[in-house]
Amino acid sequence: MSDREFGGNDDLSLPKATVQKIISEILTTPSLNTAPDSSVTFARDARELLIECCVEFVTLISSEANEIAEKEQKKTIAIEHIDKALRELGFPEYVKEVLASAGDAKEMLKVDLPGGGLYRRIMLTCWICVDEGEEDK
């Protein structure tokens, strides 16, 4: 499914700085194919394509999860709907990590932070970004 099917929302995107940070971390992570000091770079148009692919993937999963929730006559998409959507769309290998991240996010929401809900959401977003980067180290 394309975002064009949802009204052609061209505003759907991901923060370029965050995507660039993830790309940089991946490129500097030693693998079987590259040396740790490899001078591989990621072209701007490749980054834009990657962002489009990520947005498309999120749209696909959320659309499927929404359909599952509607069939169950639920008004809120729950983690169970995401789990089922991933499995039905052929991505069962992502379920374990998604459930782990959801558990981490749930724990973070339990922390009493000053500033109310907005501050809590900002801190949760920052924590998830930092946590994802830490796993590779």
Image (tube, helix red, strand yellow):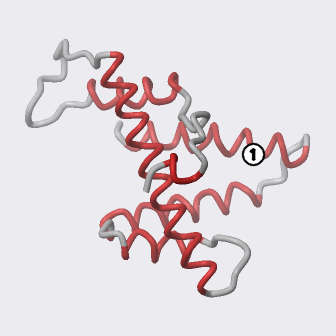
**Lateral position of residue 116 relative to residue 110, left or right:** right
Using the rendered view, name the quadrant where residue 80 is placed. Answer: bottom right
38 sits to left or right of 53: left
> Which image quadrant: the C terminus?
top left
Pick out the residue farthest to the left: 33
Q: Residues within 10 Å of mark 1 (few under 14, many from 20)?
A: some
Residue at 75% over, 45% down:
121
Q: Is residue 20 above or below residue 84?
A: above
Question: Residue 109's image quarter?
Answer: bottom right
- Under mark 1, the amino acid is Arg
Q: Which residue is drawn at 60% across and 48% down?
A: 7
Left/right placement of residue 16 relative to residue 52 reads right
Q: Nearer the viewer, residue 42 or 24?
A: 42
For this orientation, the residue located farthest to the right is 115
Residue at the far bottom in the pictured view: 72
Q: How many marks?
A: 1
Which residue is rendered at x = 44% and y = 39% of the image?
A: 134
Picture coordinates of residue 1, whole percent (x, y): 43, 57
Q: Residue 60 at x, y = what percent?
A: 45, 58
* Residue at image location 52% in from the left, 22% down from the top: 17
Is 102 drawn above or below residue 29 in the view shown?
A: below
- Whole-percent x, y for residue 107 in the image: 67, 61
Image position of 18 with respect to 125: above or below: above
Locate residue 98 relative to residue 7 in the image: left or right: left
Nearer to the camera, 27 or 134: 27
Q: What element carries label 1?
A: helix
Q: On the image, which quarter does residue 38 sit in?
A: top left
Residue position for label 1: 121
Q: Vertically, is 3 above or below 88?
A: above
